[in-house]
Amino acid sequence: TCPLSKDYMDDMKAIGSVVTRASSIQIPWLLVHGTEDDVVPIQDSLDILERANEPKQLVQIEGSDHVFSEHTPEMIKVVVGWIREQIGRS
């Protein structure tokens, strides 16, 4: 049911997941996830959030798919706002 090519999916399986490395990454985290993402399960973002160091934030965009097709403006607003916050921290 995945709309991506088999080669792409094979590459992704070989790479693995950032979940196991989340605790070793020492930069701010922003996870933006669409609730209708049919490529990456929301549980992946939840698992990363659980293991990530602070500061960290997960924003779920209701009804959005993997590429934020109908929700691009909302996603951009979230990302730009978060970047502005991070700049203010330094």
Image (tube, rainbow, N blue to C red):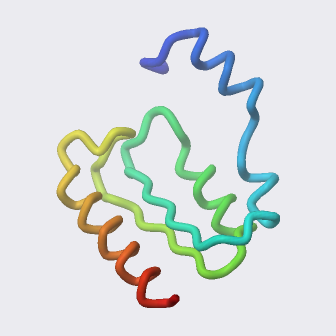
In the image, what residue occupies the spot 61% across and 19% down? Answer: 9
Q: Residue furthest bottom?
A: 89
In the image, what residue occupies the spot 44% across and 34% down? Answer: 38
Q: Is residue 13 left or right of residue 90?
A: right
In the image, what residue occupies the spot 52% across and 88% down? Answer: 90
Q: Is residue 17 left or right of residue 81?
A: right
Q: Residue furthest top?
A: 6
Pick the front one: 17 or 46: 17
Q: Position of residue 47 (x, y in %)?
A: 68, 59
Q: Is residue 87 left or right of residue 42?
A: left
Whether residue 32 is situated above or below residue 37 in the rendered picture: below
| Quadrant assignment, res 78 | bottom left
Whether residue 16 is situated above or below residue 80 in the rendered picture: above
In the image, what residue occupies the spot 57% across and 68% down? Answer: 29
Whether residue 89 is situated above or below residue 53 in the rendered picture: below
Q: Position of residue 58 (x, y in %)?
A: 49, 68
Q: Position of residue 64 (x, y in %)?
A: 30, 48
Pick the front one: 10 or 88: 88
Q: Position of residue 10 (x, y in %)?
A: 68, 16
Number of callouts in the render?
Answer: 0
| Quadrant assignment, res 56 | bottom right
Q: Is residue 59 left or right of residue 76?
A: right
